Image (cartoon, rainbow, N blue to C red):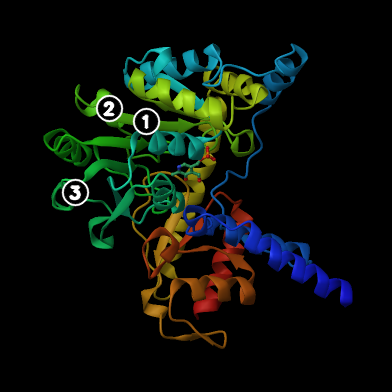
Amino acid sequence: MFIDSVTNIIQEFAFFMISISNVVGALEPSATLAMSAKAKELKAAGKTVYDLSVGEPDFVTPSHICDAAVAAMKAGHTKYTLASGIPELKAAVVEKYKSDYGLDYAANQVVVANGAKHALHNAFFSTLNAGDEVIIPAPYWVSYAELVKLSGAVPVIVQTDEADGFKMTAKQFRDAVTPKTKMLLLCSPSNPTGVMYSRDELKAIADVVIERDLFVVADEIYDKLVYPGNTFTSFPTLDQKLPERTIVVNGVSKTYAMTGWRIGWTLAPAPISKKMGELQSQETSNPCSISQYAAVAALRGDQKCVDEMLTEFTNRKEFVSQRIPKIKGLSCPAIGGAFYAFFNIKQHLGRTLCGTKIDNSEQFCLELLSKKCVATVMGSSFGCEGFVRASFAADMKMLTTAFDLIEEFVG
Ligand SMILES: Cc1ncc(COP(=O)(O)O)c(C=O)c1O
């Protein structure tokens, strides 16, 4: 008792000695990771949890990629590398963008980072100044707005409509541009909606980018998770003026089930890449040397593993797309890529579900987790109230039970 009080006094005192910075104090923690942490707590307490909260493929990393990591360790690739990444991986990224999308990048335009999230941080931190505005269509991935704010810039959110398939139109984009606008942040296929822009829709947006002299960060992390009937367009292919005003972000996390390896990258004009590499040299040094060699094997190796995972994701996407509208009051836009369903729960707001009045998506998700042990993420954390995101990076058995439980919850 006495020891506890003394510890509290010491901690309070320490709080006055070391205070949190304004920037980090204002930071919102990642909602997806927070929900997933809650799900893990319940699991640790012995409950069976149906976890649809996290955007992480449930497959193991293909064995030839793991073998390449072991070989790299045995060959002694366990030291610092160039801060911006090993030449082999830069070359493999260049080859990928040439063979997949016909784009001509040079190795000095690639910076390998500690995951795509870190690549985004490098991009914002290296190009934005205090007060610059970055246009982000909502619903948006949880980290975008926070990363933009960390760099001192201002996220300008453009609300899109479910009726328009959650896609920002060129007109909405143009209307949001001000003299302070510097950048557009675009993600297609989208996390959290799974929605994909068509080439024409992207071209209309690209025209505004050029007309208004803006830059683009194109998050292409889901470029290989595209379902039949949809075609992925890499943003810089839309106009020859775009490579010089676009920073492409991508990585191995989603395509090759390599979330824990932490390898992402940017493709950008050489002077920006040089600065991003220098930033990284001060902040983190190189990304893990072993993971970089594994990523080379992922990009250059047999792509059959990607096809196999996509086939499984396609089955799940079919299941989820058919199951959601069968649940009373739920609807969901067409899923073109990625592995998320973003479903509308508005008909259930204001109702009492399992004994609790539900007024917003956060209450919906928290109650669904506590009463039915199904973990999802509230739309509000993606800038879109009245919706819930369910990841279908979970096996069919889990998905089937989880959606049965969601049906019970709203019923
Ligand atoms: C749209 C989007 N961009 C970037 C990332 C970050 O990927 P990484 O795990 O490589 O940092 C994610 C991960 O969820 C994502 O969904």
Residue 259 placement (x, y as % from top left): 59, 39
Give the CA separation, mark 3 to mark 2. 18 Å
Tell me the residue that label 1 is attached to: 248
Q: What residue is shown at x 50% (from left), y 37% (from top)? A: 118
Numbered disc 3: secondary structure = helix
Q: What residue is shown at x 73% (from left), y 65% (from top)? A: 11
Q: Is mark 3 within 8 Å of ligand 1?
A: no
Picture quadrant where residue 81 is located:
top right
Q: Relative to 328, is 1 on the left or the right?
A: right
Picture quadrant where residue 375 is located:
bottom right
Q: What residue is shown at x 46% (from left), y 50% (from top)? A: 143
Give the CA separation, mark 1 to mark 2. 8 Å
Q: Of callouts 1 and 3, which one flags the residue occurring earlier in the amino acid sequence?
A: 3
Q: Of callouts 3 and 2, which one flags the residue occurring earlier in the amino acid sequence?
A: 3
When the figure is inspected, residue 378 is found, relative to residue 88, above or below; the finding is below
Query: Which mark is drawn over residue 236?
Result: 2
Given the image, on which type of amino acid does mark 2 rest? Pro
Given the image, on which type of amino acid does mark 3 rest? Phe
Given the image, on which type of amino acid does mark 1 rest? Val
When the figure is inspected, residue 174 is found, relative to residue 20, above or below; the finding is above
